[in-house]
Image (spheres, grey):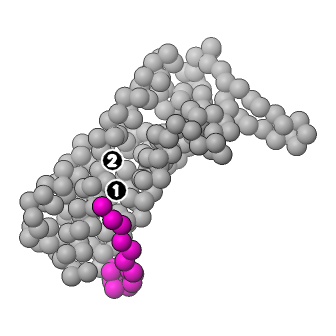
Amino acid sequence: MRTISKHVNLQRWFPANDVVAANVARLCILKEDLEIEYRGLFEKGIKNLDKNGIPWRKLYFLRNIFRTMLEIHSAVHSLKLNTDFKKAISNQPESLRKAFDGLSSEMTSTHPVIKAYRNAIGGHVKEEAILDALNNISPSRSGFLEVNTGRSQYHLKFASELCMATLFNEIPEENNLEKAEEIISELKKTLSFKAIDAVITTYLKSRGL
């Protein structure tokens, strides 16, 4: 297997005032976001990002994945409704059509859950969500604060506990990690890199690029 580089003229690939081009461009950006977030979530150790602990780094990338997944859903939904794109994909091989249909179906089925997490502490850190979590937080829940006394700098390691309490407000503290693993396992099934590539392939073929 070899990798090749191809020069891309953005104006030619993504013409102005073209809804299909705009949404495929969105998917290009979002796929690269998702690749970084996936690596950030599943990497065993990233020294420079783990100063507040591995759980905080994993939670950070998980929260960003919620946001990115919703943006992908938005782009896919727009393409699904577009007459030009529907015509383009109907003329593609069955494997590409199935990939797009699978991506669309998966995005739709997971949308409510992902949106709820994104709204609580993914794309936002909402006052109401934090207030609710603090009202219900376990008396035993705790974390650590590290202070660099020479520089008066803090590492707020307890922030990961605040994040977990907000994400899993309805779930007992002792089950938080189990729930996080469950969500991550489900997300793995919907991180459809190949399906996004299939959509881009359809677009390129339909435009003769």
Q: How many marks?
A: 2
Please report whichever mark, 2 or 1, sits nearer to the chain's N-terminal start: 1
User: For this rendering, which residue is in front, 57 or 175?
Assistant: 57
**Residue 145 in picture, x, y percent from top left:** 74, 29
- Relative to 136, say whether 52 is above or below: below
| Label 2, residues with CA under 10 Å away: few <14, some 14-19, many ≥20 | some
Where is mark 2, residue-wise?
Answer: 191
| Label 2 vs label 1, nearer the camera | 2
Q: Residue at x 66, y 29 (%)?
A: 158
Asked whether residue 119 is in view, the answer is no
Start and end of the magenta stretch?
1-16
- Majority secondary structure in the magenta region: loop
Q: Quadrant of residue 29?
A: bottom left
Q: Which three-letter amino acid code belongs to the residue tagged 2?
A: Leu
> In the displayed image of the protein, which residue is found farthest to the right?
150
The C terminus - image quarter: bottom left
The N terminus - image quarter: bottom left
Residue 156 on the magenta segment? no
| Label 1, residues with CA under 10 Å away: few <14, some 14-19, many ≥20 | many
Is residue 149 left or right of 178 when viewed as pictured?
Answer: right
Is residue 58 left or right of 9 when viewed as pictured?
Answer: right
**Residue 46 in picture, x, y percent from top left:** 59, 43
Is residue 18 left or right of 82 when viewed as pictured?
Answer: right
Where is mark 1, residue-wise?
Answer: 72
User: For this rendering, which residue is in front, 51 or 147?
Assistant: 51
Asked whether residue 41 is in view, the answer is yes
Is residue 174 left or right of 155 when viewed as pictured?
Answer: left
Q: Which three-letter amino acid code belongs to the residue tagged 1?
A: Ile
Q: Residue at x 39, y 81 (%)?
A: 7
Disc marking residue 51: none
